[in-house]
Image: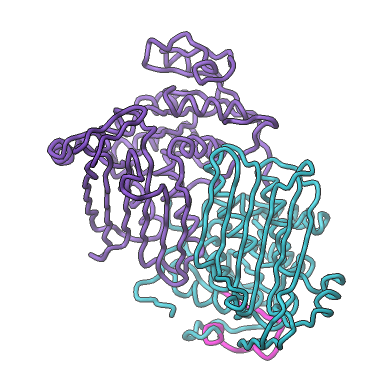
Chain colours: A cyan, B purple
Amino acid sequence: MVGRMAEIGVILSGIGGVGKDLTRLLSARPGYKLAAAYTRNPELAGRDLGEHAGISSLGVEIVTDRAGALAQPADLLVVATTSFLQDVAEDVRAGIHGGLNVITTAEEAAFPWIIDAQLADELNHLAEAHRVSVIGLGLNPGFVFDALLLTASAVAWDVESIRIRRVVDVSRFSAAVLRRIGIGHTEEEFEAGVAAGSITGHIGFPQTFSLAARCLGRGLDRVEKHLEPFIAKKRIESDNLSVETGETGGFLQRVVGFVDEVSWFEAEFIAHLHLPAVEMNAQDSISIEGYNPIHLTIDPGCNPQLGTVAMLANCIPRVVEAKPGFITVADLAIPFARETLPGIRFS
Amino acid sequence: MVGRMAEIGVILSGIGGVGKDLTRLLSARPGYKLAAAYTRNPELAGRDLGEHAGISSLGVEIVTDRAGALAQPADLLVVATTSFLQDVAEDVRAGIHGGLNVITTAEEAAFPWIIDAQLADELNHLAEAHRVSVIGLGLNPGFVFDALLLTASAVAWDVESIRIRRVVDVSRFSAAVLRRIGIGHTEEEFEAGVAAGSITGHIGFPQTFSLAARCLGRGLDRVEKHLEPFIAKKRIESDNLSVETGETGGFLQRVVGFVDEVSWFEAEFIAHLHLPAVEMNAQDSISIEGYNPIHLTIDPGCNPQLGTVAMLANCIPRVVEAKPGFITVADLAIPFARETLPGIRFS
């Protein structure tokens, strides 16, 4: 039987879009207490976390002093700062030393061993020693091609191949993220950025592929990657970035994972500032082929911002109760939405 | 990290369609050993389980002696006999006493407290005392409107209402099951059977509703049920049952769960011997409304026979590692397909 847990104390590292949304969502739910929040941005220091998030005061002052924040009694730390394992490691380590379970939105942390096995092992052993769980979680990796893909595969007898596709409206992404994933560049800049690794497309497919291979008992030989731009035929204006005619308004990313030299996992990721310009709509799809195949579509596709925060919040109780160590979404109990307080409406 | 478990020994109670398919599937996977199988059908006694399942000999003799079967070293018992909690209780009890985790396909066992709280509590305490897990599992309840619905809800901020719909081709169901759910009757027989409770439609919506309400923190006030037949406009022949013109070839079942007197959970179940006769195709859909809604479709819909067996097999490791007691699918770790041996093809 599913019981209700006692109040879970949550500390935030990073109070950008994800941190603000998480503040709104957890404040609307019984059983959670926002215990502290810290940031590297001195301009935000001293503000009230609730007011910063656009809701009423929570009596929690945003601080730049990590040690002070981590000294507050709590159960879990959410590190929502960057995409990269190396860049969140110090916060994760500090959380573990403070006896906290840790969720980070860093995509690389969804399956950290393929990024830096030594660092992943170090954090794993540290988390085991402190009896806490550490996990990388978000919408993707985390939900669409991870928790949901794995759950969908539960009706398959065998899995001969997987095809996934995500079409995403990125118009609400920050300008910095848009530029990093590949939007707002000339064709030459795009090609040079992809070659140099400064333009990444979606970060997380290696993690998704590795997790699926691990769970389904396959050994990935190699992964092929392809990234090509959609060139804007006319100017696209959006909240955070405007793209001129001839610049990249979006991209198509294709990643293929091979097992025994046969394509086993194919992923497509299409992101655009204005999807109608490429005659598409936001949609996610999962096809698992084999004996008793399954074809699943989410239409319209999952909202990146809202979905990420919901997945984080909904997994918090699961992470608190999970086994110690650096774990993956496949180690969690089935996640689900939680009770919100009566009368709370978000829109 | 997801590790490989040692070999899991499985004993079967019931070797009808589900038992046979489970034998085929587990035989194709590393890490499982079919340890014993028992049945109430004396005609099957002495046969080899593998040959009975249509594969090569497994060296496991089908017996009618439950005590003898349960004396084999094993980890888990699968009880695949009937839909009803009361009717599987004796097998479940015997399995627990034998130190076995137990999965039963009885739909009523997916949330047994609403059927017989005293019996559910007794089995729960017994399972806790013997440090084993007991669970009711299948495709539905179990997967479509349970594991998958809950997982899908992980991207929701709040859940204002749920709408689910399953359209199923039942042409491969046995004649006994078809008649019990409502197919192959005159209109008068159908109405009388529904009134008397001998015609049930799909069994399991009360379990699905109760589990969702428990997880999402809602209190169900009441459930309204409606069952109406599709009358065949011409004769329908199928493998196990043929229906004459004017008899019931299928049915539409609608179940609504109310929270605070507002419709919170609406389920539709359409079953037919020949879906084209009602201009439909097998399809499953889940809509979760609220802030950040999610609309998910499985097309074609999940195959009832193959999906049930896959879900059972894929959950076996999760049930073995689960906490002791009478648990639900919401207590399990995320299920997923498992490795099958190279070269195994089922079709």
Give the vertical position of A261 relative to A52 (above or below).
above
Q: Residue furthest front?
A: B234
Between B269 and B309, which is closer to the camera in this rendering? B269
Horizontal and vertical percent position of residue B188:
12, 38
Position of A256 with respect to A146 (left or right) is right
Residue beneath the point at 42% across and 33% down: B104
Residue beneath the point at 35% across and 25% down: B90
Between B182 and B330, which is closer to the camera in this rendering? B182
Between A246 and A79, which is closer to the camera in this rendering? A246
| Number of marks drawn | 0
Residue beneath the point at 51% across and 29% down: B22
Residue B164 counted in the magenta span: no
Give the vertical position of A152 relative to B245 (above or below).
below
Give the vertical position of A158 relative to A337 (above or below).
above
The answer to whether any part of residue A9 appears in the image is no
Horizontal and vertical percent position of residue B337:
59, 41
Give the vertical position of A339 relative to A347 (above or below).
above
Position of B64 with respect to A138 (left or right) is left
Quarter of the figure with the C terminus of chain B: top right
Quarter of the image holding residue A338? bottom left
Magenta residue span: A35-52
Position of B163 with respect to A141 (left or right) is left
Horizontal and vertical percent position of residue A180:
75, 76
Residue beneath the point at 57% across and 20% down: B55
Between B88 and B284, which is closer to the camera in this rendering? B284
Horizontal and vertical percent position of residue B307:
48, 39
Quarter of the image holding residue A233? bottom right
Q: Residue furthest top?
A: B46
The answer to whether any part of residue B246 appears in the image is yes
Position of A7 with respect to A145 (left or right) is left
